[in-house]
Image (cartoon, rainbow, N blue to C red):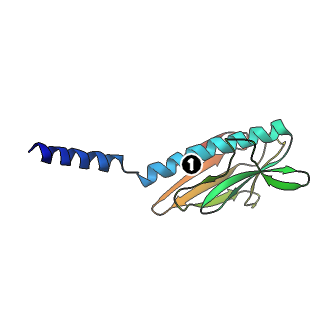
């Protein structure tokens, strides 16, 4: 009987500890919102544009130096990261641009970034003044 109880408890822990796809996507969106805010601040501090790039496998930040875009390698926070699970990213901007570039401007047009995975979707709303809010 004790063995049966132990097996049931282990099973319950395994089920409750298994990753929830919606929760994982929300976590990635929250982290990305913080990193986008940081990239915006860094571009102003460094006096150089910073660009966000994404693929279904991961994302990275680049800085414009010596007349070309270079991956940021000197900042542990803005390093390249894998998604872990294939993720589609959609950028919606009023001006129609699909890229996210941060420069010296303190005000930029608002935009939305939607992260999509099978069965889950989360949106980051940027107000153009440096605030990034995750919405479901």
136 to the left or right of 69: left
Q: Residue at x 54, y 60 (%)?
A: 116
Furthest residue in direction front, as rendered: 3
Q: Nearer the viewer, residue 72 or 64?
A: 72
Furthest residue in direction left, as rendered: 1
Q: Nearer the viewer, residue 123 or 61?
A: 61
45 to the left or right of 117: right
Relative vertical location of residue 88 with respect to residue 71 in this rendering, above or below:
below
Q: Nearer the viewer, residue 60 or 32?
A: 60
SS for tag 1? helix
Relative vertical location of residue 106 with respect to residue 4 in this rendering, above or below:
above
17 to the left or right of 133: left
Residue 61, image x, y percentages: 72, 51
Residue 132, image x, y percentages: 64, 42
Quadrant containing the N terminus in the rendered view = top left
Furthest residue in direction top, as rendered: 45
5 to the left or right of 48: left
Residue 47, image x, y percentages: 86, 40
- Name the residue beneath numbered marker 1: 29
Number of callouts in the render? 1
How many C-alpha atoms fall within 10 Å of the one at disc 1: few (<14), some, or many (≥20)?
Answer: many
Q: Residue at x 67, y 39 (%)?
A: 131
Residue 30, image x, y percentages: 56, 44
Q: Residue at x 53, y 56 (%)?
A: 84
């Amino acid at each position: 009987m004790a063995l049966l109880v132990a097996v049931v408890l282990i099973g319950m822990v395994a089920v409750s500890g298994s990753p929830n796809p919606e929760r994982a996507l929300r976590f990635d969106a929250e982290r990305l919102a913080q990193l986008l805010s940081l990239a915006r601040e860094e571009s102003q501090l460094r006096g150089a544009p910073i660009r966000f790039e994404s693929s279904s496998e991961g994302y990275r930040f680049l800085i414009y130096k010596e007349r070309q875009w270079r991956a940021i390698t000197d900042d542990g926070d803005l390093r390249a990261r894998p998604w872990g699970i294939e993720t589609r990213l959609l950028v919606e901007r009023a001006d129609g641009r699909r890229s996210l570039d941060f420069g010296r401007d303190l005000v930029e047009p608002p935009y939305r970034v939607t992260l999509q995975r099978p069965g889950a979707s989360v949106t980051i709303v940027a107000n153009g003044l440096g605030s990034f809010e995750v919405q479901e």
